[in-house]
Every structure is written in C-alpha cells, then in structure tokens.
Amino acid sequence: MLKHVMQAFDILSDSRVTGEDVAKAAKEMGLNTVEVKTVEEIVPTQFMKALIPGTDGKAKGGQAPTLGVIGGAGGIGARPRFLGLVSDADGAIAAVSVLFGLLSMQNSGDFLKGDVIISTHICPNAPTLPHDPVPFMGNPTKKALTKTENFVDPNMDAIVHAETSRGNRVINFRGFAITPTIKECYVLKVSNDVMDIMQNVTGRPPRVVPITTQDVTPIDNGVYHMNGLAQETVLSDAPIVGVALTSAVPVAGCVPGASQINDIEMASRFIVEVAKAYTAGECKFYDEEEFRKILGLYGSMAHLRKL
C-alpha cells in the first residue's frame, strides 16, 4: 500500500494537477469507469468518481453490497498562500491510494465481491478561512453541500469517509481514528466489525473520534463542526464510518508538510480491508434491528438535515 500512497502523493503534489491526471493514471492500471466533473465557483475544482466493479456487484447485475469511499476536505493545496500539499490533502491522497491499491489487486487476480465507488475532489488552489483553534481550509465551492452532492452516489450502500482531523484539541494522538457509525443523522455505537479490522491493521486498540450532533448537521449552517466526516448523512441514508487522519497537537488544515505518509498508508490499508469485508457481507456497519427499534422509540432525525 505504501507504493500506492507514494504514487498518489507524487501525482497530487503537482501544482497543475487535475482530476483527469488521476483518472489517466487509474486508466493505465485498468480502470474502465470514471467521471471527472469541473465546478467553477470560488475557485475551480474537479470531482472524480471511479467505479471498481466486483465479481457479484451491482455493475454486473449481482447482489453484493457497494461500498463508497470518499476522500473529503477543502482542497489539496492552498496556493498561492502555501506551496505544496497541505494537511487537508490527506483525504484525497487516501482515496486515490485506495483506488490504486484496489486496481493493483485486480491486476494481481484478487477481485472484491461487491463494487467500490471512490469519490474525491482535486483542488490545488483552495482558499483558507479563520477557525478556532487553527485556520481551516476553505471550500472551493460556495456551499460545502455542493461537495457532498458530488461525492455521494445513490448506489453506495455504506460509506467510508477519509479526511484530515488535526485542527482540534480532542484527538490527541498521531495516526488515524474512526467515528461511530452515523446513519440518518443518528450517531450509533461503534461497529465491532470495523473495530476488529482496525485493530488487525494497526496492531493496537481502536481509537474513536468523539463525533457530536453538531457534526451531523449541514456544515453550511454556521454552527461549530470539528470536521466534515459525517456530512454524507445530510443527503444519504447509507451508514457512514469516518476515518480521521490525526495529530497529537492542533495543526491547521492549510499548512504544508503535515501529511504523514505512514499514517495515510495505514488508513488506506484499513479502508481496503473494510472494502474486502463489507462487499463480501462480512462486515456490518450497524445493527439493523436495533436501528429500527431506535426509530420506533424516537422517530426520524431528518430535521437535522435542514439548513
């Protein structure tokens, strides 16, 4: 996996990188289905969505579940203010690394049972904005919801969202952490299956992000959000697990030199293992029966989706 992270890092480090550049590299590895969409609002950005079909996935008329892998955050660069890849680039690097890793697996004869849809956006010149305790990367789009709309695909049965989460004082270690499962704006218990995969990959006890109700509301609503790990729940009913790239001290999303290749490698390897298990029906993000009981007791939380 380290090889694919370094490949993604090299491609995305170019100040002129586009979504087409990433798509071209993936096509050279055998990718057949990829979309690149340009959105020009505050600054231009390109959304890339790639489909890796499984042996029994929906793309081939099968029944195996589809995993969505989303690499989020404001942008991969903050030029001209900062040169090079910024801390916020980690989500995109992880998503592209997973794309390259799964394609390499297929080229070696290992095929997942279900489909995987990988979405991210490529913006090397994103703006910055004030945020406490450290500055945030700004969005290239006028609304953060625009990014979510382009990330989410209706065929995603579950979602793993990778994103930098260094700009806070509540995750005080370097590496990566996972969120509890988020579904329809409910923050559910942490999945045992996902924790099992995490401890197998890292060789240490699982680390969990202290996600809050504020984080599952639309990020455009003006209230404090620690990160955007749960934003897909605003549009999608699919269960979501966030993968946060973390640090021991607050680090601004807009500063360069903060990306830790070994941490991204471990997070990307974790996502690949989740993809293997989930699409094979061997990893549950949440307890369906318990969720139905919760809805029966307390009703829908869809009102949290409103701006």
Image (cartoon, grey):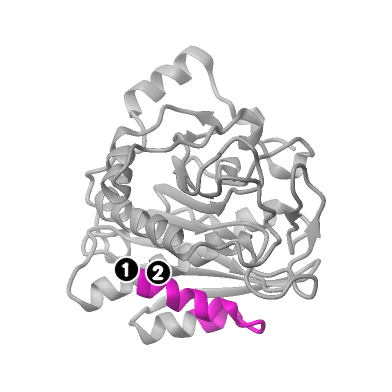
Residue beneath label 2, please?
99
Residue at figure coordinates x 59%, y 48% from the top left: 165
Q: Is residue 3 magenta?
A: yes
Q: Please tell me whether mark 1 sits on a helix, a strand or a loop.
A: helix
Residue 243 lies within the magenta run: no
Establish if 297 lies above or below 261.
Answer: above
Q: Position of residue 208 (x, y in %)?
A: 46, 36
Residue 37 in the image: above or below residue 297: below
Q: Position of residue 40 (x, y in %)?
A: 75, 72
Contact (Cβ within 8 Å) of mark 2 with mark 1: yes
Q: Which residue is mark 1?
A: 102
Q: Specify start and end residues of the magenta stretch as a single range.
A: 1-22
User: How far apart are the two marked residues, 2 and 1, measured between alpha carbons?
Assistant: 5 Å
Q: Is residue 107 visible?
A: yes
Amino acid type at mark 1: Leu
Query: Which residue is drawn at the image coordinates 37% and 53% (left, top)?
Result: 67
